[in-house]
Image (cartoon, rainbow, N blue to C red):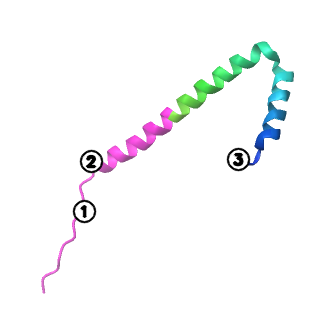
């Protein structure tokens, strides 16, 4: 979805954000967004790490041959 914005669309979004929030508030909003994105990425990594840790704890299934 975001890959379709392009450079002109990004510039328009930044200009609108500058008009709405002003030049003094924009850096604070950027920092808050960056922190939120960082925390989200760390949380996602922990969830993925938890899944792989649980799989490592499970005993491996082995094939059993039937003798006739």
- Occupied quadrant, residue 66: bottom left
- Which residue is label 3 attached to? 3
- Which residue is label 1 attached to? 61
- Which residue is label 2 attached to? 57
Q: What is the x, y in percent for residue 21?
A: 81, 20
- Name which of mark 2 and mark 3 comes first in the sequence: 3
Number of numbered callouts drawn: 3
- Occupied quadrant, residue 46: top left
Asked whether residue 54 is drawn in magenta, I would say yes
Start and end of the magenta stretch?
42-68
Callout 1: SS: loop
- Seen from the viewer's position, the closer of residues 49 and 7 is 7
Q: Is residue 47 above or below residue 31?
A: below
Q: Is residue 24 above or below residue 58?
A: above
Q: Residues within 10 Å of mark 2 (few under 14, many from 20)?
A: few
Which mark is nearer the camera, 3 or 1?
3
């Amino acid at each position: 979805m975001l890959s379709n914005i392009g450079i002109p669309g990004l510039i328009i979004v930044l200009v609108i954000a500058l008009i709405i929030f002003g030049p003094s508030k924009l850096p604070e909003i950027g920092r808050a967004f960056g922190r939120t994105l960082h925390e989200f990425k760390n949380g996602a990594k922990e969830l993925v790490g938890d899944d792989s840790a649980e799989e490592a704890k499970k005993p491996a299934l082995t094939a059993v041959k039937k003798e006739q």
